[in-house]
Image (cartoon, helix red, strand yellow):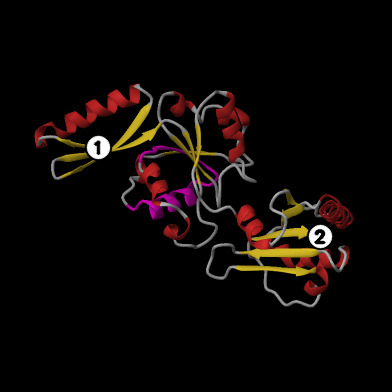
Amino acid sequence: MMLPLSEPDCSEGIAYLLQTYIKTGVFYVCLQHYNRVVMSPVKAALYLIPVPLGETAIERVLPEYNRTIIAGIRHYIVENVRSARRFLRKSNPDIQIDDLTFYTLNQHTLPEEVSGYLEPLKNGEPVGVISEAGCPAIADPGADVVAMAQRAGLPVVPLVGPSSILMSMMASGFNGQSFAFHGYLPIEPADRVKKIKLLEQRAWNESQTQIFIETPYRNHKLVEDLVRSCRPQTRLCVASNISCEDEYIRTLSIREWSKAKYDLHKKPTIFLLFK
């Protein structure tokens, strides 16, 4: 809404409104422009903020609404502070980075540290969660803090953005009614082959799409293992650098992949198996 305030009263009016709304559990961003204050509501909640999957223009993969929400958040739970700060600057060039508070959440974060990350939200301030790429809490440590918020009865708001898992599923041509994501396959060769055969069997027996990933520099080795271990007629979709300029998504039979040419080296890639 628009509130006409005289120049001398503007800052005092903003302070009063902020105090009022924070006490009621709603935080507002105020922007002064020609003696007017624009009020943009950002309720107190845990916001799950997606980021691009690569060096992709933000406006190509994220809605403008996300930037509105970001403008109203001062506390962020992030996987990497440096990359989170870079994303926030790209998302909102006017953001005051030094005014923000960052809490690190990754595989090295201790459980006792995480317990305090939701204190701002409990005090009526919105909190954002940002992962390294894609959607927070999907194959991501952010799931831990979301679980804490749910147990505490705190509101959780997922924002729209790119997910490599869902986007590869959409483009594969495989069964989108039943699918499973398995993360990384075992590194040890014998265990790896055993897992591949198990996933292939599930794809055939249950008509379920099997989705997994690999460390980018081992992508070619994984394709080789799949070609050696799976039936020739089993289908494999390889989705690399999704939503980026050099995006590559291809579905072929294992027989066809044995003859195909591709370049997946050091490129974030999703693999999908289906009958």
Q: Which amino acid does label 2 sit on?
A: Lys
**Amino acid tagged 1:** Met
The spot of residue 174 in percent (x, y) is 72, 59
- Which of these two is toward me, 144 or 234? 234
Marker disc for residue 195: none
User: Which mark identifies residue 1?
Assistant: 1
For mark 2, what is the residue? 275
Dot 2: what SS? loop
**Closest to the observer: 178 or 148?**
178
Spatial separation of the CA atoms under disc 2 and disc 1: 55 Å
Residue range corresponding to the magenta coloring:
72-93
Q: Quadrant of residue 188?
A: bottom right
Q: Does the magenta stretch include residue 84?
A: yes
Give coordinates of residue 230: x percent, y percent: 86, 63
Residue occupying image coordinates x 59% and y 42% = 137
When asked about the image quadrant of residue 253, the answer is bottom right
Percent of width and height locating residue 221: 78, 66
Q: Is mark 1 on a helix, strand or loop?
A: loop
Which residue appears at 31% of the width and 50% of the height? Answer: 94
- Left/right placement of residue 207 relative to residue 130 reads right
Q: Is 268 on the left-hand or right-hand side of 161?
A: right
Residue found 61% across the figure and 41% down from its top: 141
How many residues crowd mark 2 within 10 Å: few (<14), some (14–19), many (20+)?
Answer: many
Q: Which of marks 2 and 1 is nearer the N terminus?
A: 1
Instruction: Assess whether residue 190 is covered by the magenta stretch.
Output: no
Question: Callout 1: few (<14), some (14-19), or many (20+) C-alpha neighbours within 10 Å?
Answer: few
Q: Is residue 192 left or right of residue 140?
A: right
Residue 200 vertical position relative to residue 99 in the rendered view, above or below: below
* Residues at discs 2 and 1 in contact (Cβ within 8 Å): no
Q: Position of residue 262 (x, y in %)?
A: 70, 74
Residue at 45% from the left image edge and 60% from the top image edge: 60
